[in-house]
Image (cartoon, coloured by chain):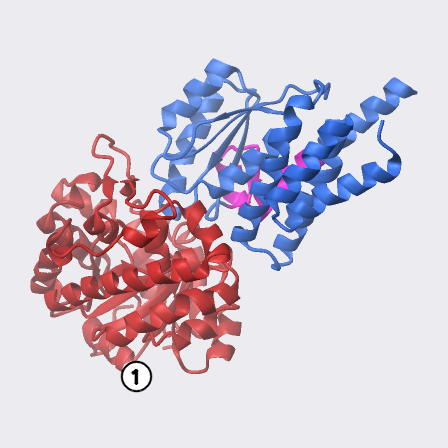
Amino acid sequence: MAETRTMTPRERVLKMFSGAEVDRPPCFSGMGNVTTAGLKNFGYKFAALHSNARMMADAAAATYKLTGFECGVVPFDLCVEAEALGCEINVYAHLEDILYPTIRKKIIHNEAGMETVSIPADFAGRGRIPLVKEAIRLLKAGIGGEVAIGSYVLGPFTLAGQIMELNDLLKLSFKKPEKVGRLLEMLAEAISLYIRELEDAGADYITVREMGATSDVLSPRVFKNLILPHLKKIFSRTRAHTVLHICGKTNDIAVSMTESGAGAISVDQKNDVAETRKKIGSALLFGNYDPYNVLVAGTEEAVRQAVRKCMDDGVDAVWPGCDIWPTVPVENIKAMMDEVINYRR
Amino acid sequence: MVTEEKRQELLNRLKNSVIQYDEDGAKEASNEVVALGMDANDAIFNGLVSGMEEVGRLFEAQEYFVPELLMSADALYAGLDILKPHVKQLDLGVKGSVVIGTVEGDVHDIGKNIVKMMFDVAGFTVYDLGRDVPLDKFVEEQLRTDSDLVCLSAMMTTTMVGMKKVISDLKAKNPNVRIMIGGAPVSSDIAGKWGADGYAKDANNALKDAINMVSSLKKMKEEAEAKKRG
């Protein structure tokens, strides 16, 4: 059944963030949702999107245009901040298959390097930061009247894991937390600088992705003592609407996540959302369907079931646990939208 | 010959060094094992590995997390480096060689390294391809080394899809090879669908699986020794 409600997707998302009443939960994401179906219309290759603002914006808008998925989000990879800080990235341009860019060369090579690294003076103009801003402007000009425009950044701990060996970072978080704390402080500043650029370009909401802090990896105690203070600073400095996303096990840190000051928290399929809802009261909670096993590899009925479960468990927005893998069948996204629109009418 | 009392003391020290991620302690106890001429296999399996088993339990109980696991692994390696040259060739009755790596597009190798450590301990020959490994490389290396087992790791939803192709390529080239996949986004369902033989759900389960493998090797070794004595 078609939507008969009058709120536009943009109004719905922005109202929800502001705490106003909405007609139904939005169905959107703050993370990557580019589809190969969308790319096909333009003849774009996935590897080429990351370094071309026009292509990035086209690809992001295509998901909404094809399926009604209620947002436009750029970029598609997780390397923008690290690259602007001086890391070298690999976009796997030689491959036909879809591979997300990774860091090829880090900037911190040993413990001493943690103390000497700093934010480059022209940080906001470095790497692909100007390109992402341009993509946001183009996206905003294209579909910004209809849907909210989102972008994302890494959390300071996850970013630290990109610019130095994750192995070392994890051990030092335990052995020398003060040293790691100083690095996170610096990175939180860099992240805020980047967020300001994204805001200036017109991003309506920013998702901070701190997946390195999942309870699969780090104890809730370390998250609270070492990482949370820096997340708090980032959120207090951000003007756009904000989401804090952490994947994996998050039930034991959900309350801390809301204390970060983020406008909403986002969790993945490993979170028991019904339990989290009880713990965090009325704080905005997004999640938590499995973006690969359900949305890409599942049947339409499995998708519908997952949507109903999210809504029954009490999410404020039906939202994926991670980036959506691009080969997602368009029919599955449409089924998801249809279920969100028609369930509990 | 060391007395049983001294043996127990050293085994406990080795074990506790791993649990308390005390590299120096592990080195000291291992040096003593060597100086006293105690059986290095005994020290590895009933000292170091026994400690790692406890670490696995603490990890599962969420008393330990990945940093503690990594530090314990460092302590284990500190001891292993000293003890390994003194290990007499194990006759385990299995041909242990494994190709291991993180698939292309993924630069996370912690889970892979923990699994690798257990293979190292078990005396497997490990061909570690590292991280961000081009898919064809797994097939090439398996054929080159004629390894029994290939372990593929992917830590992100966005990288695991590549494993599907490696599995089918490997099976096409060598139907007998055993394939184990692991990493946060992987499920037993996916492992089954893609034709993998084994699956390790996360670092925790990878460790558990690896420990199970080593434990069963320990058992086989004990049985082999009992037969020899019998």
Report the residue that reaches farthest toward the bottom.
A20
Taking depth in this image into account, of B135 and B2 the one nearest to the observer is: B2
Give x and y (percent) for residue B222: 81, 28
- Where is the C terminus of chain B found, in terms of image quarters? top right
Compared across the picture, whether B218 is left or right of B85 comes to right
Chain coloured blue: B
Question: As displayed, is residue A4 above or below residue A177?
Answer: below
Q: Report the span colored magenta.
A: B187-215
Taking depth in this image into account, of B68 and A18 the one nearest to the observer is: B68
Give x and y (percent) for residue A104: 28, 38
Residue at the spot 29% in from the left edge and 81% down from the top edge: A22
Color used for chain A?
Answer: red
- Name the residue type under label 1: Gly
Q: Which chain carries label 1?
A: A
Residue at the spot 87% in from the left edge and 20% down from the top edge: B227
The answer to whether residue A184 is visible is yes
Tell me the quarter of the picture where residue A6 sits. bottom left
Give x and y (percent) for residue B207: 60, 43
Question: As displayed, is residue B221 above or below residue A138?
Answer: above
Residue at which label 1 appears: A19
Taking depth in this image into account, of A208 and A227 the one nearest to the observer is: A227
Compared across the picture, whether B68 is left or right of A330 comes to right
Compared across the picture, whether B81 is left or right of A153 comes to right
The answer to whether residue A271 is visible is no
Question: As displayed, is residue B148 above or below residue A150?
Answer: above
Question: As displayed, is residue A186 above or below residue B54?
Answer: below
Magenta-span inclusion, residue B40: no
